[in-house]
Amino acid sequence: MEPYKTVCDKCGRKTWYETEQQCHCNFPDNDGTPDTTRCTGTLKIIDYSALDSRFTRFYDADERVEVVWKDGYEDYTGYGCRTDGKKARFYVGKSTGWKPVYLQILQKNSTGGAAILSSAVESVRGLGIYRR
Ligand SMILES: [Zn+2]
C-alpha cells in the first residue's frame, strides 16, 4: 500500500510526516548562488479513500483492464471521457495531489485521463500484461 502520509500542495513532494505542516523542501535560487529558498507549500494529509481498491493491483502491475459499467453509465455524457458503451478498456493511472483517484489511461503513453467513477463500475478484470 501507499507508504506516504502527506503531500505538498505546492511542490508535490510526498513525505512520511503524519500531520499537516509546512513543507520542508528547499530549492536552489535562480540567481546562481548556492543559497536555497524554502518551499512555502503545506504538507496536506493524503486521503486515499477515493482510490478504488479493485484497481490497485492492476495499477501496480501496469496491466490493462476491462471495466463493465453499471446500467446507465454508458449513456451518460458529461464525464469528459469516452465510453465504449457497456465496457471500456484502459490502463489504470493515478492522479496526484492530496486526494488521488485512479484514472482511465487510454494510451500507454498518455499522461492523463478521466477519473474512474467508482460508483459506476460494475466489475473489472485484467487483460494481461503485454510485452512489446
Ligand atoms: Zn513543497
Image (cartoon, rainbow, N blue to C red):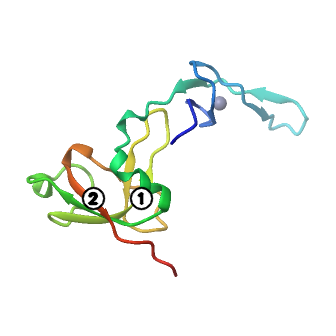
Relative image position of residue 107 (x, y in whole percent) = 41, 68
Considering the numbered disc 2 on the image, is that residue within a helix, a strand or a loop? strand
27 in relation to 54, above or below? above
84 in relation to 118, above or below? below
Type of the residue with mark 1 = Phe
Q: Which of marks 2 and 1 is nearer the N terminus?
A: 1
State the image quarter where residue 49 is shown.
top left
Type of the residue with mark 2 = Val
Which residue is disc 2 drawn over? 124
Relative image position of residue 100 (x, y in whole percent) = 43, 40
Circle 2 Cα neighbour tier, 10 Å, few/some/many (<14 / 14–19 / ≥20): some
Relative image position of residue 6 (x, y in whole percent) = 56, 29
Considering the numbered disc 1 on the image, is that residue within a helix, a strand or a loop? helix
Q: In this view, does 65 lie to the left or right of 88?
A: right
Circle 1 Cα neighbour tier, 10 Å, few/some/many (<14 / 14–19 / ≥20): many
Q: Nearer the viewer, residue 84 or 27?
A: 84
22 in relation to 123, above or below? above
- Residue extending farthest to the right is 34
Q: Do the residues labelled 2 and 1 touch (CB within 8 Å)?
A: yes
Q: Residue at x 23, y 49 (%)?
A: 79
In the rendering, which numbered label is found on residue 48? none
Q: Residue at x 45, y 56 (%)?
A: 59
Q: How far apart are marks 2 and 1 (CA)?
A: 10 Å
Q: Residue at x 20, y 60 (%)?
A: 68
Give the quarter the ligand 1 occupies. top right
Relative image position of residue 104 (x, y in whole percent) = 35, 57
Q: Is residue 43 left or right of residue 70?
A: right
Q: In this view, does 27 lie to the left or right of 89?
A: right
Which residue is disc 1 drawn over? 58
86 in relation to 27, above or below? below
